[in-house]
Image (cartoon, rainbow, N blue to C red):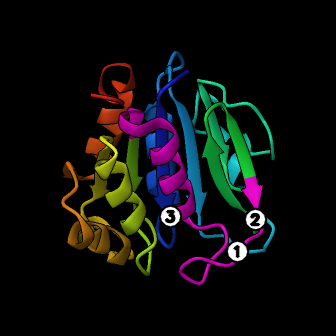
Amino acid sequence: MSDIIVIAASAGGLEPLRRIVAALPAACPAAVFIVMHIGAQRSNLPTLLSWSSRLNVSFARDGAPIQSGHIYVAPPDQHMVLEVGRIHLERGPKVHHTRPAADPLFISAAEAYAGRVLGVVLSGGDNDGAEGLRVIKQHGGRGVVQKPEEAVAPSMPEMAIARDHPDACLSVAEIAELMETCTDQVAK
């Protein structure tokens, strides 16, 4: 099974997401999962990201097998959670006043893949992703946050820093560089 990269973004997160997915190599062995706070409204996020990425990008489908070299986006109004080898979508209660939320994805990834997970928290409001990043690290994975001073909405990265000490606090350019070397860096 491939390594797992989970990314959380909200307000101000689209441009960082585009730069990060553009940096992923075509032969990246990781499966990438993205939660952006889009609520129940219609979203074109997979299309927008596919313009920048060399990998396949699509909304996640319930029960779908996880494939390396693919970017999965949480669909509107559904939490995306992982189990070993499969994606599940849920319409459970909102988490941090939103659905989809990052914490369900991050926590399920940590529980299913332990030290093989890299969690990334980007620009956004509230504290979504902070608890999930703590759980990823608790299970032996790595956590990275966008530098709050460059985030349009810094509270998600700030709360992740306050909740648990991430392995790195990086600029979007530095996170993109990390993604360029995902073969070597994802699970180290």
Residue of label 3: 103
Q: Which mark is residue 39?
A: 1
Specify whether residue 186 is painted magenta.
Answer: no
Q: Which mark is residue 176?
A: none
Q: Looking at the image, is 80 positioned above or below residue 72?
A: below
Q: Looking at the image, is 59 positioned above or below residue 40?
A: above
Q: Position of residue 8 (x, y in %)?
A: 48, 59
Q: Position of residue 118 (x, y in %)?
A: 38, 41
Over which residues does the magenta segment extend? 89-117
Q: Quadrant of the N terminus?
A: top right
Q: Is residue 161 left or right of residue 79?
A: left
Asked if disc 2 and disc 1 are in contact, CB closer than 8 Å, the reply is yes
Amino acid at dot 1: Gly
* Disc with the residue nearer the chain's start (2 vs 1): 1
Q: Position of residue 57 (x, y in %)?
A: 68, 37
Residue of label 2: 76
Amino acid at dot 3: Asp
Q: Residue at x 53, y 62 (%)?
A: 102
| Residue 43, picture quadrant | bottom right
Q: How many badges with numbers are in the image? A: 3
Amino acid at dot 2: Pro
Q: Is residue 84 left or right of residue 17?
A: right
The mark lying in front, picked from 3 and 2, is: 3
Few, some or many C-alpha atoms within 10 Å of disc 2 (few <14, some 14-19, many ≥20)? many
Q: Position of residue 185 (x, y in %)?
A: 30, 27
